[in-house]
Image: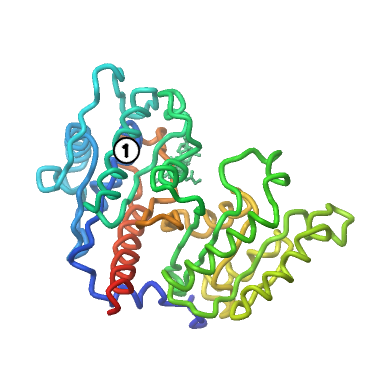
């Protein structure tokens, strides 16, 4: 039940009111062709928002087979017919081997990598203003010989972005509030996290978050909560030293650096998510505009608990917009018609909104 209207509610709705820039062209990569990417793309494109110009990059044959399977098990299934879509067709290379639905392999990894390469090259050449990526399997990329932790790192490398971040945005269906979470570290082992976290890294990530809240979400004076690392943020050094040793002094320097931004932290990680959860469910009014989590699961467990069906993964710091659903390849449900396309729909919508907004800012509308 919605009890309160909150401060940043409708930041995305405000942008929905922006007329979608007719020049914004979105590339949608198929993701791992053995995963649910093809299914969520066809479902999400069943009724694309008016004004979107979308090109799917991947295998036309895989899309057609996915469509035929969906319609044969459920003739009323809402899915776009591939014949109606703009597709840049990249057929599997015979040397990759066979691609089997529901089974990730070196072949499916090589295919999903080729779709990304095409999308990135074309976007850097100016053909598209945004890339929406369906999920890939990191294991399959590795099996195909591509040594990247994920699509984020490939995008950053090809775009020559030294400074980039993995950010999740989700708008609550209960309150209209948008939860924005940036991960300070991403695809590394838990054991590596304390060494990876440094004042320099956090300064860079905080700067990216402030820029994103201002430029993409229109919040000039955002309120940001920064998580601690240890239980109870170290309990004055009794349960870990990072907070006392450098995080608290670092945060002081950032308050001087960003006088217009309210910076709270290091907040004990277990309680950090209580307020946003209440605001998400419409049970409270006030939460922060942005959250900086120290590591992957510290940020993504609460995001996925609240918003698995609608959170969008966005790479910030690139010269173009990139969004993606928050879920993975879900090999276990491929071919059953069960894949929920809501997160893919949200990723398409956010990409279009961000691309329109960036164009509007560029031309001073
Ligand atoms: N952006 C990306 O490319 C991402 C890729 N992955 C990759 O996906 C692979 C599988 O990862 P998992 O941890 O198993 O996560 P997953 O998200 O693929 O699956 C977790 C569970 O959620 C279900 N599920 C996922 N998406 C769903 C949807 N749209 N509708 C209905 N049910 C859904 C699956 O059936 C499974 O039970 C890994 O290789 C991982 O690296 C994971 C997250 C994001
Ligand atoms: N858990 C987030 C994730 O795996 C994102 O991966 P990618 O977008 O970098 O491929």
Q: Nearer the viewer, residue 200 or 326?
A: 200
Left or right placement of residue 313 versus residue 239 in this view: left
The residue positioned farthest toward the right in the image shown: 238
Left or right placement of residue 201 versus residue 107 in this view: right
Classify 164 as above or below 354: above
Q: Could you tell me residue 307's position as x and y percent?
A: 48, 58
Classify 200 as above or below 190: below
Q: Look at 20% across and 53% down and name the residue there.
A: 54
Q: Quadrant of residue 201?
A: bottom right
Q: For disc 1, does the CB lie below 8 Å from ligand 2?
A: no
Q: Could you tell me residue 333's position as x and y percent?
A: 38, 36
Q: Quadrant of the C terminus?
A: bottom left
Q: Look at 54% across and 61% down and name the residue there.
A: 181
Classify 132 as above or below 87: below
Residue topped by disc 1? 117
Q: Nearer the viewer, residue 164 or 168?
A: 164
Q: Residues within 10 Å of mark 1 (few under 14, many from 20)?
A: some
Helix, strand or loop under label 1: helix
Q: Could you tell me residue 78's position as x and y percent?
A: 21, 51
Q: Quadrant of residue 323?
A: bottom left
Left or right placement of residue 74 versus residue 360 in this view: left
Q: Nearer the viewer, residue 344 or 206?
A: 206
The residue positioned farthest toward the left in the image shown: 83
Q: Nearer the viewer, residue 187 or 260?
A: 260
Q: Look at 36% across and 29% down and name the residue there.
A: 102
């Amino acid at each position: 039940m919605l009890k309160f209207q909150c401060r940043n509610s409708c930041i995305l709705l405000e942008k929905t009111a922006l007329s979608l820039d007719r020049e914004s062209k979105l590339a949608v990569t198929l993701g791992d062709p053995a995963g649910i990417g093809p299914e969520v793309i066809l479902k999400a494109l069943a009724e694309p928002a008016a004004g979107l110009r979308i090109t799917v990059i991947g295998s036309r044959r895989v899309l057609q087979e996915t469509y035929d399977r969906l319609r044969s098990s459920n003739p009323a299934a809402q899915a776009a017919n591939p014949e109606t879509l703009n597709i840049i067709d990249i057929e599997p290379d015979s040397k990759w081997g066979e691609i089997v639905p529901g089974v990730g392999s070196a072949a499916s990894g090589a295919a999903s990598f080729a779709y990304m390469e095409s999308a990135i090259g074309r976007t850097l050449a100016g053909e598209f203003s945004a890339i929406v990526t369906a999920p890939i399997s990191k294991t399959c990329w590795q099996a195909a010989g591509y040594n990247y932790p994920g699509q984020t790192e490939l995008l950053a490398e090809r775009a020559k972005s030294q400074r980039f971040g993995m950010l999740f945005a989700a708008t609550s269906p209960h309150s209209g509030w948008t939860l924005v979470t940036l991960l300070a570290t991403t695809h590394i082992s838990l054991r590596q996290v304390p060494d990876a976290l440094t004042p320099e890294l956090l300064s860079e990530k905080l700067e990216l978050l402030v820029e994103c809240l201002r430029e993409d979400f229109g919040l000039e004076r955002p309120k940001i909560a920064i998580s601690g690392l240890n239980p109870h943020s170290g309990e004055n050094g009794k349960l870990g030293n990072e907070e006392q040793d450098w995080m608290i002094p670092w945060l002081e320097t950032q308050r001087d650096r960003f006088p217009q931004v309210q910076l709270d932290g290091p907040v004990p990680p277990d309680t950090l998510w209580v307020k946003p959860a209440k605001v998400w469910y419409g049970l409270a009014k006030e939460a922060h505009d942005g959250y900086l989590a120290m590591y992957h699961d510290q940020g993504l467990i609460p995001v996925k608990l609240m918003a698995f069906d609608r959170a969008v993964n966005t790479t910030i710091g690139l010269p173009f917009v990139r969004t993606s659903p928050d879920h993975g390849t879900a090999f276990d449900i491929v071919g059953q018609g069960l894949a929920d396309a809501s997160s893919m729909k949200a990723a398409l919508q956010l990409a279009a909104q961000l691309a329109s907004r960036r164009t509007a800012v560029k031309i001073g509308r």
